[in-house]
Image: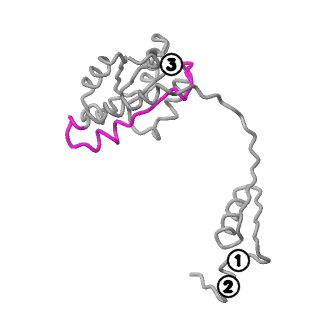
């Protein structure tokens, strides 16, 4: 195993069969364990019990990098980031492989789905080799916007921003607003 990954583990979610019925999780575990990577699987990693498993394994193994094989990161990515942060890890040290949508749901055969899942997990492990913790910074945001161009698009954008409580400045290079619309004699709206 690469020295950068000596404190790394992979967690695989069964996703109520969505993943485990289409991907051979035992093959994934056997292959990754042969590469020196600890692998844990659970029915629902997004559940309280699943998150407790992740936190406990981080603590027990003194882990500093995590790969989770589950559903799409847009579904539970924030939840998993919060989970590892609560366990003391930097959220940048998490990679999520989308095994459900990218493998289980799109491959007609189990062997193909399993092969692709293994490839995705190994890719995420390789990515973690060079990842470094991110430092959180706080930046004061001034809710102001500058819209350049007083045509129909610029005017619409400025109105939408202002309607959402954002102080908006509209700048037009010509002496009147309207852009190309100003050149048209009559405009009809339906």
Element assignment for label 1: loop
**Residue 79 located within the stretch drawn in magenta:** no
The 10 Å Cα crowd at callout 3, few under 14, some 14 to 19, many 20 or more, is many
Q: Is residue 40 above or below residue 46?
A: above
Q: Quadrant of the N terminus?
A: top left
Residue 180's x, y, as percent? Answer: 65, 79
Question: Which region shows up in magenta?
Answer: 86-112
Q: Residue at x 36, y 26 (%)?
A: 12
| Mark-to-mark CA distance, 1 and 2 | 8 Å
The residue under label 1 is: 178
> What is the distance, in whole Å, between disc 2 and disc 3 at their CAs?
62 Å
Check the image and report above or below for 6 versus 90: above
Query: Which residue is more in the foreground, 58 or 190?
Result: 58
Position of 64 compared to 162: left or right? left
Q: Is 107 positioned to the left or the right of 80 in the image? A: left
**What residue is shown at x 29% (from left), y 39% (from top)?**
104
- Per the image, label 2 sits on a secondary structure element best described as helix
Give the secondary structure at mark 3: loop
Location of residue 75 (image quadrant): top left
CA separation in Å, label 3 and label 1 = 56 Å
| Residue placed under numbered mark 2 in the picture | 183
Q: Give residue 5's position: percent from left, percent from top.
A: 44, 19
Residue 101 against residue 115 in the figure, above or below: below
For label 3, the residue is 64
Which residue is most to the top? Answer: 60
Labelled pair 1, 2 in contact (Cβ < 8 Å): yes
Label 3 vs 1, first from the N-terminus: 3
Label 2 packing within 10 angstroms: few (<14), some (14-19), many (20+): few
List x then y, in percent, for residue 102.
34, 41
């Amino acid at each position: 195993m690469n020295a950068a990954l000596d404190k790394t583990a992979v967690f695989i979610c069964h996703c109520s069969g969505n993943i485990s019925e289409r991907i051979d999780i035992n093959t994934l575990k056997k292959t990754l364990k042969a590469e020196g990577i600890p692998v844990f699987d659970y029915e629902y990693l997004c559940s309280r019990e699943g998150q407790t498993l992740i936190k406990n394994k981080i603590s027990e193994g003194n882990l500093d990098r995590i790969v989770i094989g589950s559903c799409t990161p847009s579904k539970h990515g924030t939840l998993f980031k919060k989970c590892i942060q609560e366990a003391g890890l930097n959220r940048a040290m998490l990679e999520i492989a989308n095994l459900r949508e990218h493998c289980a749901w799109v491959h007609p055969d189990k062997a193909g789905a399993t092969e692709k899942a293994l490839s995705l997990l190994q890719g995420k492990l390789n990515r973690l080799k060079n990842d470094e913790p991110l430092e959180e910074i706080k930046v004061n945001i001034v809710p102001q916007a500058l819209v350049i161009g007083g045509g129909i698009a610029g005017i619409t954008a400025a109105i939408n921003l202002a309607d959402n409580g954002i102080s908006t400045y509209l700048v037009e290079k010509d002496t009147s607003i309207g852009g190309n619309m100003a050149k048209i004699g009559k405009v009809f709206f339906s």
